[in-house]
Amino acid sequence: ETGVTQTPRHLVMGMTNKKSLKCEQHLGHNAMYWYKQSAKKPLELMFVYNFKEQTENNSVPSRFSPECPNSSHLFLHLHTLQPEDSALYLCASSPSQEGNTIYFGEGSWLTVV
Amino acid sequence: AQSVTQPDIHITVSEGASLELRCNYSYGATPYLFWYVQSPGQGLQLLLKYFSGDTLVQGIKGFEAEFKRSQSSFNLRKPSVHWSDAAEYFCAVLKAAGNKLTFGGGTRVLVKP
């Protein structure tokens, strides 16, 4: 138990579907992150939120849409994905955006068919 | 730009033997360094971190790492490996501004009985 909970743990979706990944942290942190882990690439930072405001978008395609309604919750809305988007999506949090340890959730395995 | 290199993609070690995983980084400022472990199908768990001070840091599960500024290295060690240590290990360097973690490619550790 890391204090960062992701649901669902596994998701299979078609290319025309709309789905969402959810992340919740119980650590009282103010910064939250989405990372993508593909089989053939190093871990990639996708988005950073600090106090609910997006502070980083690492050139992520618009078919990925993040939402951060409060400092404890982070969503990743998925729409018209491609098979190459199949990956492990990791949510993480840290006390703030500056120079802090980042704690990861268990990840959501996404398969796009 | 910062970068992290883990030269060994796979390492096989016998149970009870010692383990050393190499990590080299490239970063202009004083680095914040981390080692994370990922068991199959799981998220990333923090093993240990170096921010400043004593260059030999102790982590969880009996792991330690030594920061050597002259060699730009942060190698991870364990004196006696257990079968449960079979996993993938990631070295990471933190760019404090924006709290961006840059990961190495990972080293997969296999433990032989």
Image (cartoon, coloured by chain):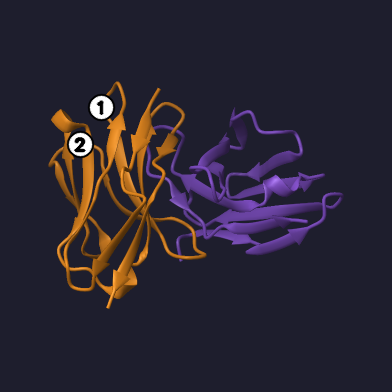
Chain colours: A purple, B orange
Residue at 70% over, 42% down: A67
Decide: is A3 above or below A49.
below
The picture quadrant where one finds residue B16 is: bottom left
Decide: is A72 above or below B41.
above
Tell which tag, 2 or 1, sits nearer the viewer.
1
Relative to B17, B84 lies left or right: right
Q: Could you say where residue B62 lies in the image, as x and y percent from the top left?
A: 21, 64
Q: Mark 2 vs mark 1: which is more N-terminal?
A: 1
Could you tell me which secondary element the residue under label 2 belongs to?
loop
Decide: is A96 above or below B85.
above
Residue A31 in view, yes or no: no
- The residue singled out by tag 1 in the image is B30
Residue type indicated by callout 2? Ser
Task: Please determine if labels 2 and 1 lie on a single subunit.
Answer: yes
Front residue of A106/A41: it is A41
Q: How many marks?
A: 2
Residue at 42% over, 45% down: A102
- The residue singled out by tag 2 in the image is B52
Chain identity of mark 2: B
Residue type indicated by callout 1? Thr
Q: Could you say where residue A14 lies in the image, as x and y percent from the top left?
A: 82, 55
Contact, mark 2 vs mark 1 (Cβ under 8 Å):
yes
Label 2 crowding class (10 Å Cα cut-off): few <14, some 14-19, many 20+?
A: few
Residue furthest out toward the bottom = B113
Residue at 66% over, 42% down: A68
Q: Could you say where residue A76 lies in the image, as x and y percent from the top left?
A: 69, 46
Chain identity of mark 1: B
